[in-house]
Image: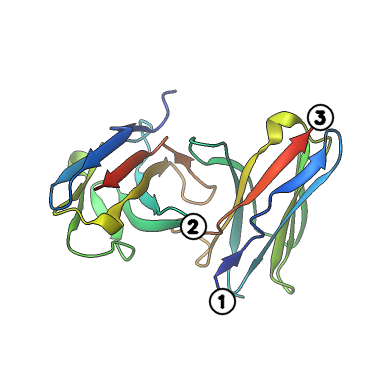
Amino acid sequence: EAGVTQFPSHSVIEKGQTVTLRCDPISGHDNLYWYRRVMGKEIKFLLHFVKESKQDESGMPNNRFLAERTGGTYSTLKVQPAELEDSGVYFCASSQDDSYGYTFGSGTRLTVV
Amino acid sequence: QKEVEQNSGPLSVPEGAIASLNCTYSDRGSQSFFWYRQYSGKSPELIMFIYSNGDKEDGRFTAQLNKASQYVSLLIRDSQPSDSATYLCALDPTGGGNKLTFGTGTQLKVEL
């Protein structure tokens, strides 16, 4: 079974630019999550999809962040315009059953300069 | 006060010893608890989850939960150099496992 795939693995962009991160969950996993780890801080929840619906987006920092999951398969997280404080590692995770933890992708390291 | 507190370490133990990793939490209503292992530059990997007070064993790993004292711990028996990693404690206050709150992690070093 393929794991959770994230693309790109690294991205360096200038402040004010737009970046789109992609996550392909494990096939058949209805639950998809985005998390972020800013350097020196803990991993923090951003949002949770169940299929194509946003179940909980309480962790999204502001309206510069837009997450979509069209068709309930892969998901994208767009940051527009990017700010310096958006730098960090963005993790995607998926699960079939929400009770037993989930599988993380390898993350996208975003650097905004 | 942070919601999930972990000593950042590093915690150094000799090979073959028992490593004890501790985590305290502030939300008394938290229901489910998870331990993840993260190697440097890699993704977090689920090791164990625990919901009930007491011990839960899986191979060399034992998770311990004490809801009255609001702490959860992870014991690693017969520690190996390959266990060297950062161990993340996480919980879901709602019990559903949908929205995890993480600690900053404890770095474990197992020395030869």
Residue A105 appears at what percent x and percent y? Answer: 41, 36
Q: CA distance from mark 3 to mark 2?
A: 29 Å
Residue at the image point whose x is 61% and y is 44% from the top: B86
The picture places residue A83, in percent across and down from the top left corner, at: 21, 56
Q: Quadrant of the N terminus of chain B?
A: bottom right
Instruction: Name the residue tied to disc 2.
Output: A42
Q: In the rendered structure, which amino acid carries the disc numbered 2?
A: Glu
Quadrant of res B38: top right
Res. B20 visible in picture = yes
| Residue wearing tag 3 | B112
Work out which quarter of the rendered image holds the C terminus of chain B and state it: top right
Q: Which three-letter amino acid code belongs to the residue tagged 3?
A: Leu
Mark 3, secondary structure of its residue: loop
On screen, B21 above or below B30?
above
Marks 3 and 1, the one that precedes in the sequence: 1
Circle 1 SS class: loop
How would you rate the neighbour count of disc 1 (Cα within 10 Å): few for under 14, some for 14-19, many for 20 or more? few
